[in-house]
Amino acid sequence: MTVRRIRTAAATAAILTGVAACSAPGTGTGGDTADSVVIGVASEPDTLSPLLGYGKDGNSKIFDGLLARDADLKLKPALAKALPEVAADGLTYTYTLREGVKFSDGEPLTAADVVYTYETILDAKTNNTSRSELAAVERVRADGDDTVVFDLKYPYAPFAGRTVLPIVPEHIAGEQDPNTGPFNTEPVGTGPYVLTSWRKGEKLTFKANPDYWGGAPKVTKVTMAIIEDDNVRATRLRSGDLDGAVLPPNLAATFAKDSGRRTYEAKTYDFRAVTLPQENEVTGDRAIRQALDAAVDRRAMVDTILDGAGRPAYGPLPVDDPWFAPGIEREHDLATAQRILDEAGWKTGENGVRAKDGRRASFTLLYPSGDKVRQDHALAYASDAKKAGIEVKVESATWEVIEPRMKNDAVLAGFGSNGDPDFGLYTLLHSSLAGDGYNNMARYDDPVVDQALDTGRRSSDEATRKAAYAALQRELVKNPGYTFLTHIDHMYVLADRWAGLTTQTEPHEHGFASGPWWNLEAWQQKK
């Protein structure tokens, strides 16, 4: 975790010129008492039900998993009283539940709740697009009220990390349709906070759970204000309407000299990439994809768009990850991009746009409205592509518009998961998940990559797994289905009135659950 004062950039400071001087955080419509907090985030979940994928990577404030992760991402007991007992063959994991844990409605947690949660997620009738992450599970069973046993189909080395998945109460969720029932918006869990209201598109409000097994939180009221536009979020933070917010680096920089606030920078697995649909007649051409990979100036994107708060992305894993394959780093190389296109028969035509067999090297790139960082990435990408003779037409749209177009149009997307390479790479790249919601958005299909993913998932030998993921990363250079651009550091600005704030190395999902508030229940008022 890094806490820093970011340098002020004159160009970005101009964005907020004329905004009224801020009132003290917590005195306006922000945190209205000393023990409350209002956080501005860019988006809200579609559902608050873990059965449909909410909180699957941990850090939900409403629920707990059998295990959780600490600040260093090491697994620690949560609803389980200890880390699991693992059989010598790696096929059985046994968890003993913590004593005295209750759901927020007062009912006790039992092993039956754990079994219900996992069995419902694994049921094909449940609309959980992350089901493949539990593919190793043969069955889950209760051994009395306090013991849960997972039997696996094959040794799955990172399985314990999957058991941060939140547990739901069978006595409530089990009486409903998991896809449409009220539990999706009226959740009940064992976590440190209880949802009190949810105004879709506006805010979610939570109160502290006084009976939380980990101790009653000192921050007793939390509001997550949903503010899609980055600039509006920064303005409301500056005005005192918010106590804290997630911000892109350039806007976080405008708070550098604010003595009443602190800026937190979290390293991440979160990357920005352009999906290159294989069914599109232009992006489906490997030479086009290879040329784009060479033409893009990743370092310039980090320096200008991210104000240095990130790293070039040469693949889905960051360069400092222990699973990163050394040697795949590559520089911006326009000459190579042009040579690849020349050799593949893409000839320069009208207005400098290349063409082949009557097809122009032109395609549409969509990015979500209101996301300034993705917009800037998209425009820089289009500019780099143009120099190679490829026309990229950039459009903004809502995700409701983008989703049905993902099959044929490129998308400036964000991905990344921490804990183990299987957690993020399988859903991003495996051909069996092509077109499965937001899984494998590029509909990528490469047998070398599929084999590497299957080997990495099914082997318990670290050397074998490391070789498989290295082969995968090298194949992505030869046959890119995405143009990987940058790994982004997440930036947060908060009123400096609490102690105990830290950050973790974060996945793509952030703001709502990840951030300095990942351990909100442990915050203390500064004295």
Image (cartoon, grey):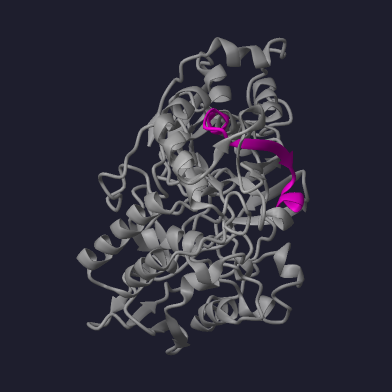
In the shown orientation, is residue 465 left or right of residue 117? left
Residue 112, above or below 286 = below
Instruction: Give the left or right position of residue 353, taking residue 457 as reference.
Output: right
Q: Quadrant of the N terminus?
A: top left
Picture residue at 64% right of the left edge, 57% below the top:
194
Quadrant in which residue 393 is drawn? top right
Q: Measuring from the top left, give residue 414's x and y in whole percent.
A: 55, 46
Number of callouts in the render? Answer: 0
| Residue 24 vertical placement versus 132 (above, below) | above
Q: Can residue 515 be seen at all in this image of the molecule?
A: yes
Q: Is residue 268 magenta?
A: no
Q: Residue 43 falls in which quadrant of the image?
A: top right
197 left or right of 119? right
Q: Position of residue 489 (x, y in %)?
A: 45, 36
Measured as percent of width and height from the top left, residue 406 is found at 66, 54
Q: Residue at x 76, y 69 (%)?
A: 182
Q: Position of residue 226 (x, y in %)?
A: 71, 41
**Residue 100 can be seen, yes or no:** no
Q: Which residues are magenta?
A: 384-402
The residue sitting at 34% across, 79% down in the picture is: 93
Name the residue located 62 percent from the left edge and 46 percent from the top edge: 411
Q: Is residue 339 above or below residue 476?
A: above
- Judging depth in this view, the residue of 272 and 329 nearest the camera is 329
Q: Quadrant of residue 293?
A: top left
